[in-house]
Image (tube, grey):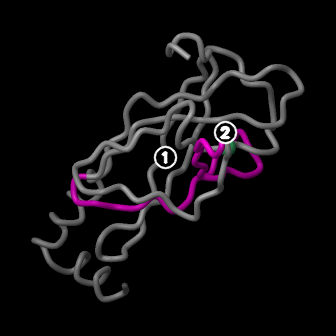
Amino acid sequence: MNIFRTLCFSLLFALTACAEADQDISISDAWIRATAPGQQVAAAYMRLQSKQGSTLIKAESNLAGTVEIHSMTMENDVMKMRMLDELPLPAGKTVRLEPGGYHLMLFDLKQTLSVGGTGEFSLHFRNQSGETHNMTVKLPVKAAGRHGH
Ligand SMILES: [Cu+2]
């Protein structure tokens, strides 16, 4: 994708396109579920929308050793979590990461997550042209009850 990058930096119209690409993704309703002391894992939720279509390929957080993209499905009346390599964001469609569905799973938590705290996430996306970029977002820690679960 070096050609695309070169175009971006050398042509004015392409620069405009690049600036727009950075605003392709909108994130709303993002939060991290508060944890009990000693808990090693946590989950983060948000709504993601890509105007042009994009794919979430990786997530990192200052709160955790690793972050995985997970799905949760019912199989024979049993809830199963599965790690996804990536999460497609179809153009214009809101993809909800919420309790009981997709979520970001935090492993090796470095601290207890208390209501009122925050955590920083770096989200990596790949756009339709194969270019990757990342976004840093700050998420509040909230109690699950507030969201009706
Ligand atoms: Cu999970």
SS at circle 1: strand
What residue do we see at 29% from left, 71% from top? 128
Which corner quadrant of the figure contains ligand 1? top right
Task: Please tell me whether residue 43 is drawn above or below residue 6 in the rendered image.
Answer: above
Q: The residue under label 2 is which amino acid type?
A: Met
Task: Give the residue at the far left of this rendering.
Answer: 13
Query: In whole angstroms, how far apart are the C-alphas of marks 2 and 1?
Result: 31 Å
Q: Please tell me the numbered disc located at residue 79.
A: 2
Residue highlighted by disc 1: 136
> Which badge, 2 or 1, is on the more N-terminal residue?
2
Which quadrant of the structure image shows residue 116? top right
Boundaries of the magenta span: 51-76
Left or right, 54 with respect to 60, comes to left
- Residue 31, percent from left and from top: 53, 28
- Front-most of 136 and 81? 81
What residue do we see at 89% from left, 26% from top? 38
Q: The residue under label 1 is which amino acid type?
A: Thr
- Residue 87, percent from left and from top: 47, 57
- Front-most of 33 and 118? 33
SS at circle 2: strand
